[in-house]
Image: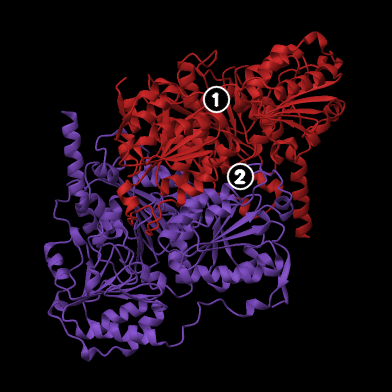
Chain colours: A purple, B red
Amino acid sequence: MPSTITVADYLFTRLRQLNVESVHGVPGDYNLSLLDYVEPNGLHWVGNANELNAAYASDGYARLKGLSALITTFGVGELSAINGIAGAYAELAPVVHIVGTPARKSQQERAKVHHTFADGDFQRFALMYRHITVAQAELSDPRTCAQLIDSTLQQCLIHSRPVYLALPADVVGIRIDATPLQTSIELPRSLPPSVDAETALATVLDRIYSSQRPMILVDGESRAYGILTELQQLSTITHWSTWTTIFGKSCIDESLPNFRGIWKGSAASQHDKDFVKGRDLILCFGPHFSNTNSYGYSSVPDAKISVHFMQTSVQVDGQTFRDLPAKQFLSALLAKLDPSKMTKSPEEVVLNGEKNGIPSPPGSAPLTQDHFYKFFDKYLRSGDVILAETGTAGHGCRDFKLPPHSLLLKPTTWLSIGYMLPATQGAGLAQRELHAAGRWSAAHQPRTVLLIGDGSFQMTVQELSTIIREKLNVLLVLINNDGYTIERCLHGWNQGYNDIARWKYLQAPAFFGANEGQGGEGGYRASTYRAETWDELEKVMAEEDGEEPKLKMVEVVMDREDAPITLKGLLQQQKDAAAVAQK
Amino acid sequence: MPSTITVADYLFTRLRQLNVESVHGVPGDYNLSLLDYVEPNGLHWVGNANELNAAYASDGYARLKGLSALITTFGVGELSAINGIAGAYAELAPVVHIVGTPARKSQQERAKVHHTFADGDFQRFALMYRHITVAQAELSDPRTCAQLIDSTLQQCLIHSRPVYLALPADVVGIRIDATPLQTSIELPRSLPPSVDAETALATVLDRIYSSQRPMILVDGESRAYGILTELQQLSTITHWSTWTTIFGKSCIDESLPNFRGIWKGSAASQHDKDFVKGRDLILCFGPHFSNTNSYGYSSVPDAKISVHFMQTSVQVDGQTFRDLPAKQFLSALLAKLDPSKMTKSPEEVVLNGEKNGIPSPPGSAPLTQDHFYKFFDKYLRSGDVILAETGTAGHGCRDFKLPPHSLLLKPTTWLSIGYMLPATQGAGLAQRELHAAGRWSAAHQPRTVLLIGDGSFQMTVQELSTIIREKLNVLLVLINNDGYTIERCLHGWNQGYNDIARWKYLQAPAFFGANEGQGGEGGYRASTYRAETWDELEKVMAEEDGEEPKLKMVEVVMDREDAPITLKGLLQQQKDAAAVAQK
């Protein structure tokens, strides 16, 4: 390694060291010189169609690979991306947002350059980003660039949330000392043993040994804490009934015999309600109790019988033990855990059910929301990344019985519709990179499956073009139910504002430049299908995909007045209200 | 009028009083109850495909009608829109951004609801908006809603810049006193006469009477000050050479005999440079000297010979007179101005040239950027609204000789690519409303003309669907030059990051649901064309449009290495640099 290196090379070397292989973003005149360094550093540049989409894609990529990088230009670019970064903050996706800013001369002279308000203020946008990132740095002094880059990236990894780096155009090519690159960026070392930690461990073990009717509840922040392997181990050792939240779904292998599905609180079956009500201990990992991740808070475990494992603390019976990083604490717990001291509750025998199966309606019947997800379930396969957009798909996907080594991205708290299509691009690319590196288990060509409603699809549709350009292996299921059905269920059953324009959805791949057709030699192909009945859908899904990456787009037509079972109550209320209003 | 009224009705009544007839936005669960009040108040709801597009569309609408309204939901919606609102701030478009926020109960309990970071903080997004709006109000106390709405709307009008209204879902339907609605919202009254104002007026008049070689320079903030009529009058009375900036283009009737075009500073012809250099007085209205509006500051008039008319102050020879609202001061000036005391400079005879004409290349030659705008010029007609997107179109449009009663929206300072397509939707709708109200002069069916490059088109393409749904009369000229040519001219001539995906652009209208074809009875139609040569383009443009609104989309193919003349120097530099790098 040379003894000096440019700031841009330093930054991109760090990203490479942290397994980032692709960079998302959009060029703009304040970042063009920075972009010159991307590909020479062995990074693949994904030029997205716009910055919000690029941010969403970076979020999807980060959720698979543990880190992603997004490059936008100052002002216009970073503000277009801001909602995507806010979503990454809300749901713990570690995105490094690098903003190419005007040269220091312009900033210091308060020049009235474009992409500003021509008032000499260059700090507004960075101030806005302070609300939605866990660390920010302006790389304006070459003496501190290396240190600021390193500490900012480390904060990104620690919190699994976005960070913000502002890089003035004239700093990009300045040479700095390369020595720090010889030491890799890592999470902070474990804390030394402490009396408090010992007390916490003893307290938790005591709860575990004394429990007669325990259960495990896995929530989605667990992924960000890096404890999925430990959780798998815990569930396997204890045989305890293991549930997830919505966010936690796919954080644990759903084929485990003691896996029970999503704990749905007020929306659960009576059987499940009785079961959970009967617990005397709930070990809850990575809690994230937004209303939409907890069935309106109804699935939040009773604090009195719970142990909550948070990012750096553990709560037992309302008492908080601090400075206990989740991974370190859980490892210590597993090391000390003596299974012979644990009860074996009878409930553990309650079995992981069969995979969802064939729909009951006849094959020629029209597709319905509720059965659709049960039907579709059987076509999911090991190694799939599945994305289900906010809306009916985000509800329906909760009952999938996921195959091993699959990953489900689903709406949790931020719920920004339009997120999932660009996220499919980012996740699909990350999946391909992981597979190429031998870090993704899949029997077949790894596949990215997107289930999305028509309203959401319209928001960010142009990113289908990037999926095509990147030749990703994607199954896109477009649920055409003529508008914002999820919103109709919430309010405004018959209101025009829940209508959307009627597109010819299946023309999308051709419009965005894909080669069409089933056959043909080499190259990337798109094929499109439409299904209104079970028979039609079955025919599409049964088709042999082959091993070549392709875009398979299926327009699934469903009634605008139909919704998954969990939304049916709301739907009926709105329908009734509309009927009353019309009288 | 009833004595009480709901908060939502109050707000929408105010907007109607201020000539807002359509509201842009996207539904979301925190604004659905608010949307119930839109159409009953006689407002047309435009459901956009996403929030950024809705913000851009609102900006376009506001630039024609003097006020617009945008409704988004909390968090996800408002953040998606934020770049559009920032652009409206930068370039003085008065947009009222209404955000439907969670009910006060949720906020006061710091509930972990969706579209937040599940941390009980509901103020982050409003804080972000403080950076890009001139007034903000949270309508959480019914006692102050009316007053806050009124003062916020007034600030929007005064500054011609965006404002922010947060309206909790549970406040929407609360009844408040309706009495204030009987008094309309107006700009503040004129200031009473003052010694300072008299001194300023005398000073300016003295400069005017003593000048031998004066000129008028109209910049774009003049539109926001509401002084276009006065400027037209001033130019007509004085016969002085009248120029504009880029932003100021179309603020003055270009058929005036003393109209001279854009003063291009360092990019001007030697003749123009000599002319401006020879001035002893420049009356400059609405100055907005960003680098991109002033040819890198080279067209900024010398302060020593200038009078700058700003929003509420006048600068003469470096001295600032304050508290002189532009319209009031200019009216007073016009009232007092005695033309007999003014010089008649010989230069005023230098004439407004002919309209640009036929291109010199043969009809079968390929289209070139530089000639394209001269050629296209002759097809512009009275009453057109023309939008030229950042990029080659934004440069090329500077040499249009605009017909009377036309309006040109062009890139000035914010330069967010992707803006112009949604802005076309907003502007086209505003144009139609103004025409219907007898406030838009046009011989034919008023037409909205968009000139846009392929890279920009991809950013916000889905808003073409709203143009179709709204049945707007649009001529869309898509300049297909295979990527970000404007950026190639700035940096990275051969770099892959300036490439974009190759779409089948002309499939867009059909994909987005338009009926195709030239003929057919009734209904809204789209027709598509492709032109690579002058003959082909002429044929398309010569076609009779008829009086029915329609979407006419022309894909104009130009070389990726071609640019308007003002960019040619930059282009050659980048080409040379790339050639050197390859050696």
Helix, strand or loop at disc 1? loop
| Chain ID, mark 2 | B
Residue nearest the observer in this picture, A291 or B500 = A291
Pointer 1: what residue? B188
Q: What chain letter is assigned to the residue under label 1?
A: B
- At label 2, counting other C-alpha atoms closer than 10 Å, the crowd grade (few under 14, some 14-19, many 20 or more) is many
Q: Pointer 1 and pointer 2: residues touching (CB < 8 Å)? A: no
Disc 1 and disc 2: Cα gap in Å? Answer: 50 Å
Q: Marks 1 and 2: which is nearer the front?
A: 1
Task: Using the image, tell me which numbered label, if any, was put on residue A291.
Answer: none
Q: Nearer the viewer, residue B116 or A16?
A: B116
> 10 Å neighbourhood of mark 1: few (<14), some, or many (≥20)?
few
In this view, the residue in front, B245 or A42, is B245
Q: Give the mark nearest the N terminus, 1 or 2.
A: 1
Q: Is residue B509 left or right of residue A6?
A: left
Residue at screen point 65% across, 24% down? B326
Image: A132 above or below A76: below
Task: Look at mark 2 in the image and give the residue it sits on.
Answer: B482
Whether residue A462 is visible to the viewer of this picture, yes or no, is: no
The amino acid beneath tag 2 is Asp
When asked about the image quadrant of residue B43, the answer is: top left
Q: Is residue A90 left or right of residue B94?
A: left
Q: Position of residue B464 (x, y in %)?
A: 46, 35
* Residue lying at 45% horizontally and 57% vertically, measured from the top left: A425
The amino acid beneath tag 1 is Pro
Viewer-closest of B466 and B152: B152
Count the marks: how many?
2
